[in-house]
Image (tube, rainbow, N blue to C red):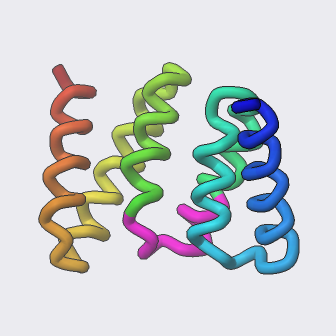
Amino acid sequence: MVGQADNGRRKFLEDVVRQQPDDTFARYGLAMELIGTEPAEAWTHFSYLLERHAEYAPTYYQAGAFLVKQGRLEEARKVLTTGLEVTGRQGNRHAQSELQAALDDLND
């Protein structure tokens, strides 16, 4: 039953992204949905958000964590550092603290 719910959620998100490619929330959700099963496709969606919606703060933490899990540590550092800059401009202290903690963990 869970697999069917996951497939339904994925299909819904894919449909939204197909109809509204710049729907940041749907694209982010789709990337998150694909991390465990289709990492290359998940990265495609994270990359899209990082390139075309650079102010969408949630992407930085999850994209950084994704890259760490993939062993792409230098790319992860860059994403997390950029996320710190973006969230700093936004005054988003909560996101900044999460990004800084992830960066500190990466540098340990």
Q: Percent x, y for residue 93?
A: 13, 65
In front here: 32 or 65? 32
Q: Is residue 42 above or below residue 92?
A: above
Q: In this view, does 7 lie to the left or right of 92?
A: right
In the image as oriented, which residue stretches furthest toward the front?
A: 1
Please state the horizontal and vertical placement of residue 87, each as a whole percent of the image.
Answer: 26, 68
| Residue at 55% over, 23% down | 70
Residue found at x 59% / y 45%: 32
The one of 50 and 27 positioned closer to us in this rendering: 27
Q: Quadrant of the N terminus?
A: top right
Magenta range is 48-57
Rendered location of residue 79, percent (x, y):
41, 49
The residue at the point 78 percent across, 71 percent down is 16
Q: Is residue 1 left or right of residue 52?
A: right
Residue 51, magenta (yes or no)? yes
Marks counted in the figure total 0
In x, y percent, where is residue 74? 41, 33
Please check the rendered image and state whether residue 5 is part of the magenta-colored stretch, yes or no.
no
Task: Name the side, left or right, on which 89 lies relative to 5.
Answer: left
Q: Residue at x 65, y 66 (%)?
A: 26
- Image quadrant holding the C terminus, namely top left
Quadrant position of residue 41? top right
Q: Quadrant of residue 52?
A: bottom right
